[in-house]
């Protein structure tokens, strides 16, 4: 809709698309398709922002930063994991301390983690 109503070079359109992209990337339930869409959207608007606003403009810098972060998250999420839910594993619980457990979730995150950080596994340790 923004592209139909606003000119391609309107900075409001850039801001709206960046906000949409952030919503896609920051959603804890985001899928690989959401991440791919975010990367695609940023790749589409980055050259226009650079041409219209210039490389030093804060909007252009924000788009470039968001694109780099989205690519990194996508790349990490597309990497196949070694273990699957239900697999038995041995986890490092500290120096020279190992504990057995079961993988209960892939790409785990919680409120206390840094924004955009996902642990590849959530493991329920044996008691």
Image (cartoon, rainbow, N blue to C red):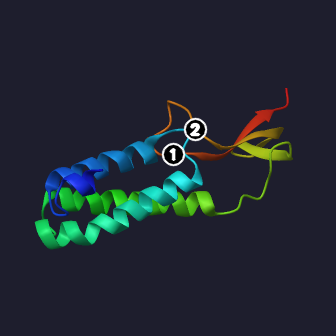
Q: Is residue 55 left or right of residue 63?
A: left
Residue identifier under label 1:
117
Res 63 quadrant in image? bottom left
Residue 34 position, x and y percent, is 51, 52
Image point (50%, 31%), residue name: 112
Residue 4 bears which disc, if any? none
Q: Does 19 appear above or below 77?
A: above
Image point (50%, 30%), residue name: 111
Q: Does 29 appear above or below 31?
A: above
3D distance between C-alphas at marks 2 and 1: 7 Å
* Mark 2: secondary structure: loop
Q: Is residue 77 left or right of residue 87?
A: left
Q: Does residue 43 appear anywhere in the picture?
A: yes
Image point (30%, 50%), residue name: 1
Q: Are marks 2 and 1 in contact (CB under 8 Å)?
A: yes
Camera-nearest residue between 75 and 53: 53
Q: Does 110 appear above or below 84?
A: above
Res 57 quadrant in image? bottom left
Q: Is residue 118 left or right of residue 51?
A: right
Q: Does residue 54 appear anywhere in the picture?
A: no
Q: Which numbered disc, 2 or 1, marks the residue that appears first in the sequence?
A: 2
Residue identifier under label 2:
109
* Mark 1: secondary structure: loop
């Amino acid at each position: 809709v923004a592209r139909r109503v606003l000119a391609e070079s309107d900075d409001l359109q850039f801001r709206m698309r960046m906000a949409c992209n952030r919503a896609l990337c920051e959603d804890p339930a985001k899928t690989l398709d959401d991440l791919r869409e975010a990367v695609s959207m940023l790749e589409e608007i980055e050259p226009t922002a650079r041409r219209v606003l210039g490389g030093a403009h804060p909007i252009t810098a924000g788009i470039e930063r968001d694109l780099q972060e989205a690519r990194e998250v996508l790349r990490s999420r597309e990497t196949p994991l070694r273990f699957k839910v239900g697999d038995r594993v041995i986890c490092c619980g500290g120096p020279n301390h190992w504990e057995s457990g079961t993988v209960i979730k892939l790409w785990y995150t919680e409120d206390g983690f840094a924004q955009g950080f996902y642990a590849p596994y959530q493991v329920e340790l044996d008691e």
